[in-house]
């Protein structure tokens, strides 16, 4: 009994002493200025109410234009700002920092067995492998497929209607295309079994991480399980098919899934089906929400700015006139779309689909006179430079010509990140957007049905009503 009472007495004293030591250690370091917000909730509510752009502007003005601290998604974050902040994070990948996802994201996307694993262990595919299969030389074979699918998509979903909602149709096109190129899925029912739950995941994985019935996050977790179950079925079936086919033929000419199934590590071990599922999910996330948001923003600006549309139309028709009626686009055609690509880049500057990315410090590091302790999470944001007049003259103006010549200064235009962790799917996204853009402007002019439609933030910036547009066929 005496030992028991002694333990009860010493416990609060011990906790107080530990708290004192940690507090003293923190006070000895000059941490970035900022606030943790409300207990448990952090600054999630303020971020949701203000949106990422206004939230960042508010905090940089209040605390520091270089780096500030906050508490988002249950994690202490150091948010780096400006071109120098971007350079610091991009240049110190794997030296001071490593990739990281919030637990709430991993819980929605990945198998429970990987919830505590590092992102490096979860996404086991070597970055060089992804860069090889997504580099321009490899993408050349995809462009005719993209073009054929874009034509089919417009024939089925746009042409029969006078008015369409761009955002949901863009999501359908980008997801169908990813399923075709990554896994050779063409059956509408099979794609729907992945698309419906995957939409639940992307709609809820960045919401308040409260896993209660009826919440968006709870729906994201349930949707994630359905996606993983369906992927495991597809992967298992493909593995059986591979065992009966010529592996060299498959590796050279088939889809991404078949190639991943043949990848081995330095010990000759093939990836498990769960590991493959994790990697496919990571690629679907990267190729779905952000790309469909990018397509939507580009078409929004084309509908709003007739002088920009006219220039794009002129460029695209010059390409179309050199081709036969049923001749599909090639890599050489994509390379001619220089003004169109400038339009896409300006759209990505003004309405970036990806807001930034997380990292985790693997050692104490110092930036702008502040210490970011080991284990803290960091975040870089597109909004600290994309509309900053320090880097872009008249930043609110849509001006594709600012990308002519040498273009923006380094580390200021970062829709795909930078450094060793720059998005390996950049060229994939570029070709996907340009191919659909070519097919849309070749057939229609666009007129916004809701001229002052607001942009809202979910996982990416999207028009509140899905961007309904009136289709005006050329010659009418």
Image (cartoon, grey):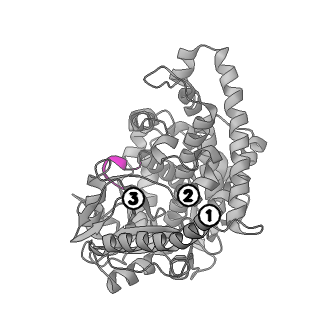
User: As drawn, which residue projects farthest toward the front?
Assistant: 2
Label 1 close to label 2 by CB (< 8 Å) = no
Give me the residue at 69% from left, 21% from top.
240
Mark 3 sits on what residue?
375
In this rendering, position of residue 155 left or right of residue 51 = right
Mark 2 sits on what residue?
103
First in sequence: mark 3 vs mark 2: 2
Q: Separation of disc 1 and disc 2 at Cα?
A: 28 Å
Q: Looking at this view, is 56 or 118 the one in front?
A: 118
First in sequence: mark 3 vs mark 1: 1
Residue 424: % across, % down: 41, 45
Residue 314: % across, % down: 42, 58
Q: Looking at this view, is 297 or 282 the one in front?
A: 282
Mark 2 crowd level (few <14, some 14–19, many ≥20, 10 Å Cα): some
Q: Nearer the viewer, mark 3 or mark 1?
A: 3
Callout 2: helix, strand or loop? helix
In this rendering, position of residue 411 left or right of residue 462 = left
Q: Which residues are magenta?
A: 417-423
Callout 1: helix, strand or loop? helix
Residue 418 included in the magenta stretch of the image: yes
């Amino acid at each position: 009994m005496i030992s028991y009472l002694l333990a009860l007495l010493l416990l609060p004293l011990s906790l107080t002493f530990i708290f004192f030591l940690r507090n003293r250690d923190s006070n000895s370091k000059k941490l970035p200025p900022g606030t943790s917000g409300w207990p448990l909730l952090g600054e999630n509510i303020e971020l949701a109410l203000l949106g990422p752009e206004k939230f960042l502007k508010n905090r940089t003005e209040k605390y520091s234009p270089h780096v500030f601290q906050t508490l988002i998604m249950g994690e202490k974050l150091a948010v780096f700002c400006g071109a120098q902040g971007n350079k610091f994070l991009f240049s110190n990948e794997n030296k001071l920092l490593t990739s990281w996802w919030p637990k709430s994201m991993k819980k929605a996307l990945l198998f429970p067995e990987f919830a505590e694993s590092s992102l490096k262990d979860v996404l086991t595919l070597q970055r060089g492998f992804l860069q090889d299969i997504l580099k321009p030389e490899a993408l050349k074979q995809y462009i005719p497929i993209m073009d054929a699918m874009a034509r089919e998509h417009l024939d089925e979903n746009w042409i029969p209607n006078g008015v369409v909602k761009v955002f949901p149709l863009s999501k359908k096109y980008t997801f169908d295309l990813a399923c075709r190129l990554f896994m050779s899925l063409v059956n509408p029912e099979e794609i729907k079994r992945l698309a419906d739950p995957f939409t639940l995941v992307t709609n809820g994985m960045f919401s308040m991480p409260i896993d209660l019935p009826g919440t968006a996050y709870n729906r994201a977790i349930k949707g994630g399980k359905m996606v993983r179950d369906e992927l495991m079925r597809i992967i298992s079936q493909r593995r059986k098919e591979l065992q009966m086919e010529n592996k060299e033929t498959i590796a050279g000419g088939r889809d991404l899934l078949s190639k991943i199934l043949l990848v081995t590590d330095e010990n000759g071990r093939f990836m498990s089906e769960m590991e493959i599922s994790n990697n496919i999910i990571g690629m679907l996330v990267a190729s779905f929400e952000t790309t469909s948001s990018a397509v939507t923003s580009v078409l929004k600006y084309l509908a709003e700015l007739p002088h920009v549309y006219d220039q794009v139309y002129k460029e695209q028709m010059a390409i179309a006139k050199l081709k036969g009626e049923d001749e599909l686009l090639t890599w050489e055609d994509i390379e001619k779309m220089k003004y169109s690509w400038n339009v896409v880049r300006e759209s990505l500057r003004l309405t970036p689909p990806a807001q930034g990315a997380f990292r985790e410090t693997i050692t104490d590091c110092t930036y702008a006179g502040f210490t970011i302790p080991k284990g803290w999470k960091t975040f870089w944001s597109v909004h600290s430079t994309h509309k900053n007049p320090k880097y872009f003259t008249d930043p609110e103006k849509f001006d594709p010509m600012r990308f002519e010549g040498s273009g923006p200064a380094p580390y200021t235009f970062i829709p795909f990140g930078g450094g060793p962790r720059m998005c390996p799917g950049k060229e994939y996204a570029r070709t996907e957007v340009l191919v659909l853009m070519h097919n849309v402007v070749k057939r229609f002019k666009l007129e916004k049905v809701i001229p002052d439609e607001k942009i809202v933030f979910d996982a990416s910036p999207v028009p509140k009503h899905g961007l309904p547009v009136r289709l005006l066929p050329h010659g009418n």
